Amino acid sequence: MTYVVAVSGGVDSIVLLDMMVRSKDASIVVAHFDHGIRDDSHEDADFVAAVAESYGLVFETRREELGANAGEALARARRYLFLREIAKKYDAELVTAHHADDMVETVAINLLRGTGWRGLAVLDSGDLRPLIKTQKKDILAYALQHNLEWREDSTNHSNRYLRNRVRPAVKALSTNSKNQLQLLRDEQIVIKNAIHDEVYKLFGDGPQYSRYVLTHVSRQVAIECLRVITNGSLTRPQLARLLLAIKTMPDGRTYEAGAGVVVRFDTRNFYL
C-alpha cells in the first residue's frame, strides 16, 4: 500500500512521518503544500524536502501565492486540493497528522459558531488520521525522545485565527475531558453515518429523488435527508427553503438552492 503523508514541517506531521517510516510496512510519499502566506514559508518547504531526502522518500510539493490576507478556509481548501491530486497520482491513501487536541479545537470552534450536533462529528473524512486519539503532549514527548527536528509556524501565535484563540482553553482541559469529547465525537460520527445509510436506502445515490417521501416525513427528518443529498453544502435556512420548494414547486420548474445546487422538478421527483 502507498501512503501520501501530508507534512507541514511542524512537530505533529514530523512525528507522524517518523512513526510511519519506523513501521517499515508502507511505501511513503511526502507531500508539502507551500501556501505562500508567510514570507518565509519557502523555508518550510526546503526543510521538509531535506527530511524526505534523509528518509529516502519521494517528495512532492506545490507553492501558491495566496498572500498574507488569505483566510484559513482558503488555505485549507487549496492544500487539500493539492494533497488529493498527489494521492490520486500515486493511487495512495492520504494520511494527515490531526490529533486529539486538533479534534477538541475543531469542536470548540464549531460550538462557538453555533453548530448543531453535526459540528461534533469532526475530522471524519476518509483520510487516515493515525494520531487522532493521541494528545499533543504525547506527540511532543515522542519528538523529544527521538531527537526529531521541526519548524514552528509563526502564524500559530497570531490571534487573527480563531483556532489560535481557542487553543489556550483546549490546553487547559483535563485528559479526562478530552477523552470524553473524543467519545462524544465518535458517537456523533456513528449517528451521521447511520443517517447517510438510511438516506441511501430511501433514495439511492441520485440524481433522482422522490418528492413524495420528503413530504410525508417530519420536517426535521426531511431536512436531515436533504443535508445528505446536497453533501452538506447548504445552510439550515437554505435546506428549509429547498424543502418548501420540493413541496410546492410545479412540474418543469427549477430552483437555485444556493452554493451551486440547482434542483429541477417533475410531478413525482426532484433532480440535482
Image (cartoon, rainbow, N blue to C red):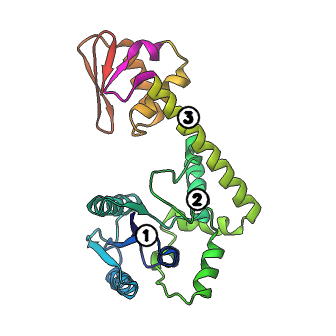
Dot placed on the residue nearer the N-terminal end, 3 or 1: 1
- To which quarter of the image does residue 228 belong? top left
Q: Residue at x 38, y 72 (%)?
A: 28
Query: Is the Cβ of the residue at disc 3 closer than 8 Å to that at disc 2?
Result: no
How far is mark 3 from mark 2, CA to CA?
Answer: 21 Å
Q: Residues within 10 Å of mark 3 (few under 14, many from 20)?
A: few
| Bounds of the magenta segment | 202-215
| Front: mark 3 or 2 | 3
Tell me residue 218's x, y (percent): 55, 18
Q: Amino acid at mark 1?
A: Ala
| Front: mark 2 or 1 | 1
Marker disc for residue 194: 3
Q: Amino acid at mark 2?
A: Met
- To which quarter of the image does residue 147 belong? bottom right
One can see residue 267 in this view: yes
Rendered position, 176 above or below 157: above
Tell me residue 272's x, y (percent): 30, 28
Dot placed on the residue nearer the N-terminal end, 2 or 1: 1
Q: Residue at x 52, y 70 (%)?
A: 159
Q: Considering the image in quadrants, where does the N terminus appear? A: bottom left
Marker disc for residue 103: 2
Quick one: SS at disc 1?
loop
